[in-house]
Image (spheres, rainbow, N blue to C red):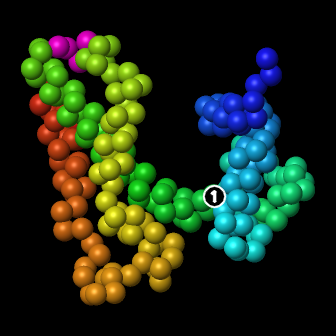
Amino acid sequence: MASSPNKSKTAMKLAFFGRKRSKAKAWVTQHFFTEWINLCFGPAVKKYLAKKNLPMKCLLVLDNAPGHPPDLEVDILNEFRFIKVLYITPNTAPLLQPMDQQVISNFKKLYTNHLFKKCFDITDTTNLALREFWKEHVNIVHCLKIIVDALQGVTRQTFNSAGKKLWPASFAERDFEGFDMTDPDDPEPVVMDEIVSLGKSMGLEVD
């Protein structure tokens, strides 16, 4: 039985996001990226612009990652030719992308903190060794739950601070009523201290 279009699109999404290729096989990644543009990104953008009654114009900004085809516009389907592709100068992506500047770094700290807490709570109450903890209490489902907890811990202040480096004028310090937009209960300044403390409690060498 032939698969439905929706199942094919879902499979393509999973294939694109689930594959990692070396530079030697970068053309395979480029192939999936192009398919994703034509099957997922293009239709989604077209639907959004039509729904919002906006002109059919889209600028897709890409870095020089191996998976980004250098001649992507040539392979975009005719119905999505309103998408224009702009490649930024090599080695400038970390300077231009707020996520690279701060958000991802803070997310990693929060993820490590949640993982250490889980490890400490279980090993402290069950007397399990760390090796047994990794085998019995860490799997993909657990990691996904920790990712959710960590993402929820990334505050609006962090996003504002990161985005302000790229576009300062778009991030006001106060809202229209004059209230401070920062989060006074931002937990991130103490996250590193918690990681170090938990690590030492479990006998790990943490600086």
Spot occupied by residue 175 in the image (x, y as percentages of width and height) = 33, 82
> Taking the image as drawn, is residue 86 in sight?
no
Q: Is residue 133 above or below residue 154?
A: above
Residue at image mark 1: 91
* Horizontal side, residue 171 vs residue 111: left or right: right
58 in the magenta segment: no
Kind of residue indicated by mark 1: Asn
Apparent side of residue 2 relative to residue 185 in the rendered image (left or right): right
Q: Quadrant of the C terminus?
A: top left
Which residue occupies 31% across, 83% down? 174
Q: Secondary structure at mark 1?
A: loop
Residue 77 percent location from the top left of the image: 87, 52
Identify which residue is drawn at 9% across, 20% down: 125
| Residue 7 in sight | yes
Residue 43 percent location from the top left of the image: 74, 53
| Position in image of residue 78 (x %, y %) | 90, 56
Give the magenta-colored segment's residue range.
Answer: 128-132
Viewer-proximal residue, 65 or 176? 176
Tell me the quarter of the picture where residue 9 sits: top right
Q: Is residue 14 above or below residue 60?
A: above
* Magenta span dominant secondary structure: helix
* Quarter in which the N terminus is drawn: top right
- The structure residue drawn at horizontal position 20% and vertical position 34%, both measured from the top left corner, is 117
Closest to the observer, 76 or 177: 177
The residue nearer to you, when weighing 104 against 36, is 36
Q: Is 203 rendered above or below residue 35? A: above
Which residue occupies 15% across, 20% down? 123
Query: Quadrant of the rendered structure where residue 180 is?
Result: bottom left
Any magenta on residue 129? Answer: yes
Q: Quadrant of residue 118?
A: top left
